[in-house]
Amino acid sequence: MLNAMIRFSLTQRLFMLITGLILAAAGSYAWLGIPLDAFPDISPTQVKIILKAPGMTAEEIESQVTVPVETELLGIPKQSILRSTTKYAITAITLDFNEGTDIYWARQQVSDRLAAVKDKLPSNIEGGIAPMSTPLSEIFMFSLENPSMSLLQRRQLLEWQIRPLLRTVPGVADVNILGGFAKTMQITPNPQALAQAGISQDELMARIEANNVNTGAGRITVGTDNFTVRTEGRIDSLEALRQMVIVSNANGSYRLQDLAKVEIGHLARYGAVTKDGSETSEALIVALKNANTADVVSAVKLKLAEIEKTLPPGSKLNVFYDRANLISTAIGTISEALVEAVILVIVLLALFLGNLRAALVVSCVLPLAALATFILMRYFHLSANLMSLGGLVIAIGMLVDSSVVVVENMVNQLAGGQRVPRLHLIYRATKDVATPVVSGTVIVMIVFSPLLTLSGLEGKMFTPVAVTIVFAMLSALVLALTIIPVLASYLVNEKAVEEPRFVHWLKRHYLATLTWVLSNGKKAVAIAGTLLVLSFGLFTLVGKTFMPTLDEGDIILQLAKSPSISLQSSLDLDKQIEQHLLATVPEIEQLVARTGADELGLDPMGLNETDVFLQLKPADQWRFANKTALIDAIRTEVMKFPGIDFNFTQPIQMRVSEMLTGSIGDVAIKIFGDDLSQLNTLASQIAEMTSNTTGAQDVKTAMTEGSPFINLKLKDGLASRYGMDALSFGRYLKSQLEGIMVTEVIQGKKRTPVLIAHPRDNISSLTQLQQQVILLPDATQKPLSELADISFREGPILIDREQGNRFAVVTTNVSGRDIVGFVEELKSKLDQQLQLPSGFSLSFGGEFENQQRATNNLLLVVPVAIMLINLILFTTFGTISKALLILANVPFAMMGGIISLYLSGEYLSVPASVGFIALLGVAVLNGVVMVSYYEQSRHLFASLEERVKQGAARRLRPILMTATTAMFGLIPLAFATGPGAEIQRPLAIVVIGGLITSTITTLYLLPLLYETLEKRK
């Protein structure tokens, strides 16, 4: 089949050239249609439930809402993990499903289970399934700035003018509005006036609701016409609400304004937003799952440009987070490395082939293979991102391997001066190397197959790498056997067959050194073996981690204050920190901080928790050489504010950590148990031990206790004497403190809640609470202290659960050492110093958990890949000894990778492991090139020694070309800077180091071992 394909290509050269042009055009078109993103979609199939229970404590919600819902959800098939976070008035339940589960099926299953349990939940529960987004869907954030507008007006503008327009943008799942004041029409009843009118507050609420409604009464026929009869009662303004008639009796008619104060107010706030020390409002764009991030951001920007023209004078939309910036810089980093790699490879080809035409023929495979890869990427719905394009860069040096072998053999055939037709020589040269070329390519593809078995985050990150490499290698193989011979038939002339002086010089010195190695075999083997053993000794000194941290550009500073702090006090402290950082850290462009919970409940933080987005100036304006030093400077300034726990992270890094473990940090230590007090004590002990472990930084314990409550209990008999039950008592107090929604006023597209509420600062002390007048159902009035017993108690601020069990968590970042070594030391400390009570257990999560899973997967799959490679080698050469001879090159390739990791200071991470996997392919490929020529030239030389020497000399050029093109193709990645370079650098370092040692082994040790093997036969 291969021979027929090559023959067809050379006999139909014009057709093949046209096919190449069509391929180029189709590839260019495919590239324009491929979605762009910074990362592959690394989120699992995830469904989130947000349930709000106004006024309920965390323990009450857990027992009445979270536990019943979790119990129902645990029966859903295909789920991988169930987590929940319960706080005052809200619970967020997250359900992750197995990879490959259809998101619509998963949402339907959760919806059905939620509907089944709804009747068992309290009647005041609000919410449901969150929008179909992912934890990484927060793609664009901006604040609305206008000094002449109040916070309430800004919120109204965002909520009712900007949000509806942005939700029309394709790919936008929702627009989350945060900060400012949500407008209400507030009714503050006058107890004396209500008593005089003879109605209770519950009756007042019922009559307001009953009078704010339109109804259809039916139809009547008048003559030949049909009329719809309707009653109209719905109000549309604050004045209409004031004039609503509530009651008419012997004392007269009472309008609402006679019984209560009616004014514009706002909903109780559970969060706020500040910018550079002043309050503001912001909007957060949430993208749909599987949406094209770059396209969505671009469409959002276009829509905002239209909207901004219609805003009140002085309004400015201040963008402080734009995912497109990360996408462009990450793609820019990898694209720059790709271009540099292509240039270096072309220069090397020209140097080794000694002819620009031959170099151009071989290098043509690079753009054509890349364009063919883009076609396959679009067909299989792969996005162009840091990892998929990184796979293309990794493959650049290997893409030319097949073409190098083909063209180099053509050059040798043409140099022989045989009197046969030119096309026949090219056909014969291509045919002779077709089988080893195909075998080598298949081996490379098998080598990368372990990446397809990775699960979790590492699987989602590196599967696109493997798939892209396979696409590119397949494309390059087909091109090497079809279009490359055609191009060579036109461009490679007699001048191209002359071997360059540079290669002559290399061969001469190589033969001299090879002769010494063959003459001193034992010494050579001893030296190689010693270096191999030493390298594996160095391996024990190389640190281990999961994944290098991607520099996203911006920083998030997370603050945690006293659990009982009020929203206003929390904001005051935030403003102080923001102003201080702006004054002392000139690298900060602006700060936008989000305190407390967001509107949708997707990020249910407490009033004591703040995420500060730090937008930085360009790096050339910094006083520091790197971002780590800048973070250290910020840390020093934040430490001047005592009593605050803080942590540094980045937007995507934060969401990925939360997605994987439900917490943020390089290492998460989870303590499982039922007793919250005991969990809190254990967490504090573990946090102290963690802080005393070398490398620990930003150690943080989730505060689970310390939320103060004022307990009110109706006095037996006294309250019931007046017809007051617990439910009515609670509703009345809620109207005094937080407000109760009665109805809503619809004004066009705007909907304004109507609340029974009192001014928020009406009660600010225990004495005022005790003296608060309560209007009883019989219209009498009594102070609260006469109706209820008042006591104090503390309860949990939050309750975290996983798989139906409570847990507390301690998180830490690790600096200056590897994560695995850090965890091993910490585990040893905990085993020696911590005594866990019965029923309690520990587990480690975060980056460490990911690293362990990835390592276990690779240790299982890589040996299988090596066995498959051995099988292919056996099939190719017909003997197990030749297959093992080639595989003997692998340990020496690993040796170079280990030495380069150690010298560079990089850790053994998943990218570095991918580098070692890539080395398997390159090391085996070079061995195949050498041994296959030895076997083909068996009858061309009189003696074995001559065959070994001359065969090695003739294979010197293709081996050096394949090795150096692969090596120099990765050099731009090893020295690249900018977002994304951190992930690809360890891979490039490992492959470059391994290529050096594997090439030396192939050129010297393999001929020696081959000669030894042949002599024994």
Image: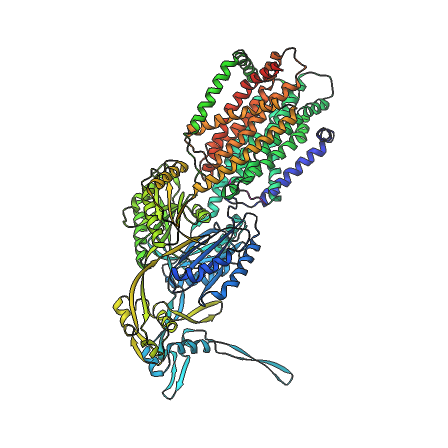
Which residue is nearer to you in this view: 418 or 475? 475
Q: What residue occupies the far bottom of the structure in this picture?
A: 250
Q: Is residue 166 left or right of residue 430?
A: left
Q: What residue occupies the far front of the structure in this picture?
A: 838
Q: What residue occupies the far left of the structure in this picture?
A: 767
Residue 210 falls inside the magenta stretch = no
Residue 383 falls inside the magenta stretch = yes
Which residue shows up at 46% across the image and 44% down it? 326
Q: In this view, does 417 lie above or below 549?
A: above
Q: In the rendered image, which quarter contains the N terminus?
A: top right
Q: In this view, does 658 lie above or below 629?
A: below
Tell me residue 499's x, y (percent).
60, 17
Which residue is nearer to you in this view: 342 or 657? 657
Q: In this view, does 168 lie to the left or right of 361?
A: left
Q: In the rendered image, which quarter contains the C terminus?
A: top right
Which residue is nearer to you in this view: 512 or 724? 724
Q: In this view, does 22 lie above or below 964?
A: below
Tell me residue 232's x, y (percent).
50, 78
- Residue interval drawn in magenta: 381-386
Tell me residue 490's x, y (percent).
68, 26
What's the coloring here? rainbow
Query: Can residue 364 be seen?
Result: no
Q: Count the marks: how many?
A: 0
Tell me residue 330's x, y (percent).
48, 41
Q: Is residue 540 left or right of residue 1005?
A: left
Our reading of the magenta stretch's main secondary structure is loop
Q: Which image quarter: residue 923? A: top right
Query: Can residue 228 be seen?
Result: yes
Q: Is residue 588 left or right of residue 926?
A: left
